């Protein structure tokens, strides 16, 4: 079954404690993206990747890092989380006309 | 830079009424997606529109695409409460960009 898997689904952390949200896809897609969703703002792109070792900033990259060492994985790294990064995060992969989303990670930074 | 504008952002309808949600985008693309999102859930794919003039229908929802006008519409016919959700359009140009979403509430 084609899917995008994010972990964890829920995370509460404290300001400044580094964390990683993992994303994995099993469709051999080249493109992967991270979005954050905040009330009234829709989904805003954080980073995207066009292939292994190729990443670029989206609309709201500040405070985030990504890496793409393997085609299937695209982790999102928050080196020093802050409360304004409390949000719902989605990972997506796409190629051609196929687009799939993970189940979301609800992150709370206190 | 690709921008996607969706309106209205909020829509309150009575059951049985019709309405249209609009999605404008700023650069050439022939891949337009509509998604539904229920509170706390991920995005559920509704329609994928891949060519100018494409029209797709599923139940009370119908989506269309005009690539020349860079406009897609999602038409709701005879709304029912179960359609209450947030609807997003998205344009795919290598990466996917979303509209801000339309929060639809259907009241009895």
Image (cartoon, coloured by chain):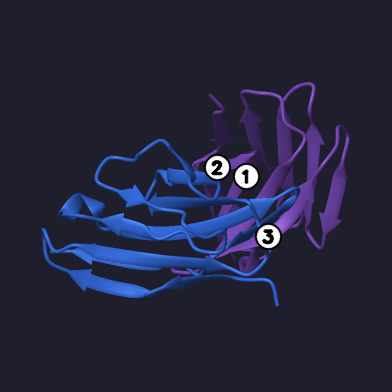
Chain colours: A blue, B purple
Residue shown at 16% from the left, 54% from the top: A80
| Residues beneath discs 3 and 2 located on the same chain | yes
Identify the subunit bearing mark 2: B
Give the image quarter of residue B19: top right
Q: Which residue is mark 2?
A: B98
The quadrant the C terminus of chain B occupies is bottom right
Residue shown at 32% from the left, 49% from the top: A65
Q: Position of residue A32 (x, y in %)?
A: 55, 52
Q: Secondary structure at mark 1?
A: strand
Q: Position of residue A66 (x, y in %)?
A: 37, 51
Is residue B71 depicted above or below A96 in this figure? above
Residues packed near mark 1 inside 10 Å, few (<14), some (14 to 19) or many (20 plus): many
Report how far apart the C-alphas of labels 1 and 2 lie in the structure. 6 Å
Give the image quarter of residue A83: bottom left
Camera-side residue: A64 or B60?
A64
Q: Position of residue B21 (x, y in %)?
A: 65, 41
Identify the subunit bearing mark 3: B
| Mark 1 touches mark 2? (CB < 8 Å) | yes
Is residue B80 depicted above or below B48 in this figure? below
Q: Which residue is mark 1?
A: B89
Label 3 or label 2, whichever comes before in sequence order: 3
Label 1 or label 2, whichever comes before in sequence order: 1
Report how far apart the C-alphas of labels 1 and 3 lie in the structure. 10 Å
Residue shown at 59% from the left, 56% from the top: A93
Left or right side of A99 for A18: left
Residues packed near mark 2 inside 10 Å, few (<14), some (14 to 19) or many (20 plus): many
Left or right side of B52 for B11: left
Say if residue A28 shows up in the picture: yes
Q: Secondary structure at mark 3?
A: strand
Q: Which residue is mark 3?
A: B45
Label 1 or label 3, whichever comes before in sequence order: 3
């Amino acid at each position: 079954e084609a899917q995008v898997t994010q972990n964890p689904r829920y995370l509460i952390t404290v300001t400044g404690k580094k964390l990683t949200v993992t994303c994995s896809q099993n469709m051999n897609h080249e493109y992967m993206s991270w979005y954050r969703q905040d009330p009234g703002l829709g989904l805003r792109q954080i980073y995207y990747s066009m292939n292994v070792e190729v990443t670029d900033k989206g609309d709201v990259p500040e405070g985030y890092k990504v890496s793409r060492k393997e085609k299937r994985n695209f982790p999102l790294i928050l080196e020093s989380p802050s409360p304004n990064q409390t949000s719902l995060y989605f990972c997506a992969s796409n190629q051609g006309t196929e687009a799939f989303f993970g189940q979301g990670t609800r992150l709370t930074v206190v | 830079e690709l921008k996607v504008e969706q309106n209205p952002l909020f829509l309150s309808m009575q059951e049985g009424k019709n309405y249209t949600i609009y999605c404008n985008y700023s650069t050439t693309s022939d891949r337009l997606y509509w998604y539904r999102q229920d509170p706390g859930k991920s995005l559920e794919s509704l329609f994928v529109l891949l060519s100018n003039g494409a029209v797709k229908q599923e139940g009370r929802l119908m989506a269309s695409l005009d690539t020349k006008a860079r406009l897609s519409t999602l038409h709701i016919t005879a709304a029912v409460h179960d359609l209450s959700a947030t609807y997003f359009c998205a344009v795919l140009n290598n990466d996917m960009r979303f509209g801000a979403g339309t929060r639809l509430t259907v009241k009895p």
